[in-house]
Every structure is written in structure tokens, then in C-alpha cells.
Image (cartoon, rainbow, N blue to C red):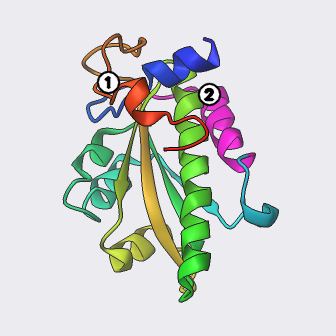
Amino acid sequence: METLNALQSRRNVRTYQDRSIPNEDLETILEAGRRSPSSKNQQRWDFVVCTEPSQLERLSEVWRGASFVATSAVTVALIAPLSDEPAVLGSIHYDLGQVTMAMMTVAADRGIGSGHTYVADQDLARELLGHPVDMFCAWLLAFGYPADRPLTPVRNPNRRDYEDVVHIDRW
């Protein structure tokens, strides 16, 4: 798939087939995240890859909107360092956004759906994932083959018109 087609095909998927993701595809998705750009190349992230159904079920309890994690083939927890400095934390989240988009785009390129979710219950996340106390679980990225329909370019996306978004030289 062409990159733009992958971007146009990517959508939040929250229902998955009961089908595993080949290791080669999973490793490619993880490599896309690992190779993402970061502020000053600090790479302030770690990934915890979860595939065990009982762990996915418990992990789906970290946020009220995370129920779809329970039925994913794989969920990747994005772990990052804690910081009291707003600029540092903002930079970390920006970098994690790039990780997220890279992984989700590569997954879409392979016909694998994805959905992201917030993590409210940090204690439960730490219990399940085992990350150090000076780090937090920023996001969960669920992956799996869509149960409803395959990923294809969305013809009429619910997006603002190009002319309303893009401003040349000045607003």
C-alpha cells in the first residue's frame, strides 16, 4: 500500500477478529515506533507488548473507554518517564504521538486495525505491566484485524474542508 493510502485507510478499530498477528508484522509495527522521531533524539519511551488474553482483559479496565483492548490480538503499552515540568511532559506526549501514528500507519499498511486509549488507573497499569515507579503508562495501542470491514481508503472522511484547514502565509 502507498503511504497516503495507508493514512487514508487508517481508522479507529474497536472490534477485532479472533486472529493473531504474524510475528513479522508485529515486529515491523514495533520497529516503526522505535524508529519514530523524538525531541533531541531522546527516545523517551518503552513498549510493553501484551498478547495474553487474561492480561488484555485486565488491561481493558485502566480506563472506561478501553474495553476494546480485551479483544485485541496485541496491545502495546507506551511507557514514558514522569516529569513535573509541563514543557518536558508536553514534549514527551508529542513524541509519543509520533510513535502512535507511525505504528498505526504501518499496521494499516498491513491490513491491521488499531485503536488507542487513555490510561487513568496508573496503579493497575503498573501492577499488570511491571514498569518502574518513575515511569507511567501514557497510552495503550490495540491492534487486530477489523471484525466489521477491512481497511480501505475512507472515501468521505468526516474532516473539515481543506480550504478551512490550510492557510498559506497567513491566517
Residue depicted at 68% across the width and 39% down the height? 32
Extreme-bottom residue of the structure: 84
Q: Magenta residues?
A: 19-35
Task: State whether residue 148 is above or below residue 166.
Answer: above
Dot label at residue 17: 1
Q: Position of residue 106 (x, y in %)?
A: 60, 29
Can residue 158 be seen? Answer: yes
User: Which amino acid, by three-letter code, is at mark 1?
Assistant: Gln
* Magenta-colored stretch includes residue 29: yes
Q: Is residue 79 left or right of residue 68?
A: right
Residue nearer the viewer, 70 or 142: 142
User: Which amino acid, by three-letter code, is at mark 2?
Assistant: Asp
Dot label at residue 25: 2
Task: Check contact, mark 2 vs mark 1: CB within 8 A.
Answer: no
The secondary element bearing badge 1 is classed as loop
Extreme-left residue of the structure: 64
Q: Position of residue 49 (x, y in %)?
A: 54, 51
* Magenta-colored stretch includes residue 130: no
